[in-house]
Amino acid sequence: MVSKVKLNDSNSTRVPAEALQTQLSSIFEAVGCSERHAEIAAKVLVAASVRGVDTHGVANVVGYSKNAADGTYTVPQETSVISESETTALVSGGNGIGLVSAYEAMEIAIEKAKKHGLGMVSIKDGHHVGMVAYYASMALEHDMIGMSMTTAAPAVRPALGAKKMLGTNPIGFAAPAGEERDFFLDMATSTVASGKVGLARRIGVPIPAGWGVTIPEGGEITEPPNGENKDWALNPLGNTREQGSHKGYGLSVMVDILCGVLSGGGFSSQLKSGENMSWVMAIDIAKFRDIDDFKAMMDDMIRELHATPPLPGVEKVLVAGDPEADAMDDRLANGVPVENGQYAAIRKRAAEVGVEVII
């Protein structure tokens, strides 16, 4: 059933990644973003779609651009430093597009890591940052380890709880390899990202039992709910006490601490829908050991994991980042699938803001 909650040739339209980048950039510029910020926002969204993280990909340009146009987001925007040390910074996203403030915060973290071995930045006054692991992956081209995470308004119940109290609070982590693919972890601390429930509803398929429950009864849901409301909640990663729901719950609270409490921007239950506080970190591997030796050991570890005998009926053992890399190979060669309704919505939005429709 999980595999059915995906895009395919019957429910999506393939578009070249370059065309999507140009189209999205033009839409963001048309609603007041600077050229640089428009390119950044488009790049983050296209990267998510290219990697197969469709829920956080190009279709979000519609909502983001409307929020910019109506003043929900402040554009043009500025990512301003509130306080900093050699290795740390607290920044304000300026109530702007979250993709931009998280990107610029990671740029700050990387520059600090180049000088001092480590850089970490907490971001307040922010909004949705899209695919959170994108910012961790920015460290890879600098031979660094990256980490990123973000809070969100409540959508998830705590372990044993019967009320939404936590966001999906995702975590991203990236580390460079040598000949093997880089390690790329992108995970929600809930059983699933909330966007996948919406995707399942749009393409007309059920969701697996365990993704969410009715509130306060705790009954399993397989029919995708129609949007966020108080009658249902996502489960924490692990789902039940016996399967380790306290672990997903604990990780979610950790994200709230680093993103919301450390920044002062607020933890999940204090946030309104659309508000997000974030945290990013870059680690310069060369300050610890020779980078080539590090990458060689990464290759050894990844190869050993891939060589693990699979369970019966399973083709092979994967490593975090494998599905996204496979999707990237396909989508860069054959175009990025955009769900048909969202494809039409992007085209409509381009026309609404007065830019050429090129996709």
Image (spheres, rainbow, N blue to C red):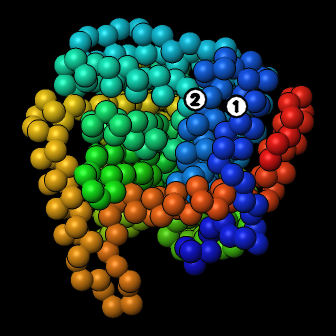
Q: Is residue 141 left or right of residue 211?
A: left
Estimate the spatial distance between the alpha carbons at disc 1 and disc 2, rounded to whole Å.
Answer: 8 Å
Residue type for callout 2: Ile
Tell me which residue sits at (61%, 15%) in the image: 77
Q: Mark 2 = which residue?
A: 40
For the N terminus, the quadrant is bottom right
Q: Nearer the viewer, residue 90 or 208?
A: 90
Residue 53 percent location from the top left of the image: 55, 54
Q: Is residue 332 above or below residue 30?
A: below
The answer to which of marks 1 and 2 sits earlier in the sequence is 1
Give the crowd class for mark 1: few <14, some 14-19, many >=20 residues within 10 Å: many
Total label count?
2
Residue type for callout 1: Ser
Residue 55 percent location from the top left of the image: 61, 53
Q: Mark 1 and 2 residues: CB-CB less than 8 Å, in contact?
A: no
Q: Is residue 324 left or right of residue 356?
A: left
Residue 218 appearing in the image = no
Which mark is on residue 25?
1
Quadrant of residue 275 within the rendered picture: top right
Quadrant of residue 122 within the rendered picture: top left
Residue 300 percent location from the top left of the image: 16, 62
Q: Is residue 184 above or below residue 36?
A: below
Residue 203 appearing in the image = yes
Residue 266 percent location from the top left of the image: 46, 26
Tell me which residue sits at (61%, 44%) in the image: 46
Q: Is residue 256 above or below residue 331?
A: above
Most extreme residue toward the bottom is 312
Tell me which residue sits at (37%, 51%) in the image: 184
Tell me which residue sits at (22%, 77%) in the image: 308
Q: Nearer the viewer, residue 169 or 266?
A: 169
**For numbered disc 2, what is the local secondary structure?**
helix
Q: Nearer the viewer, residue 318 or 18?
A: 18
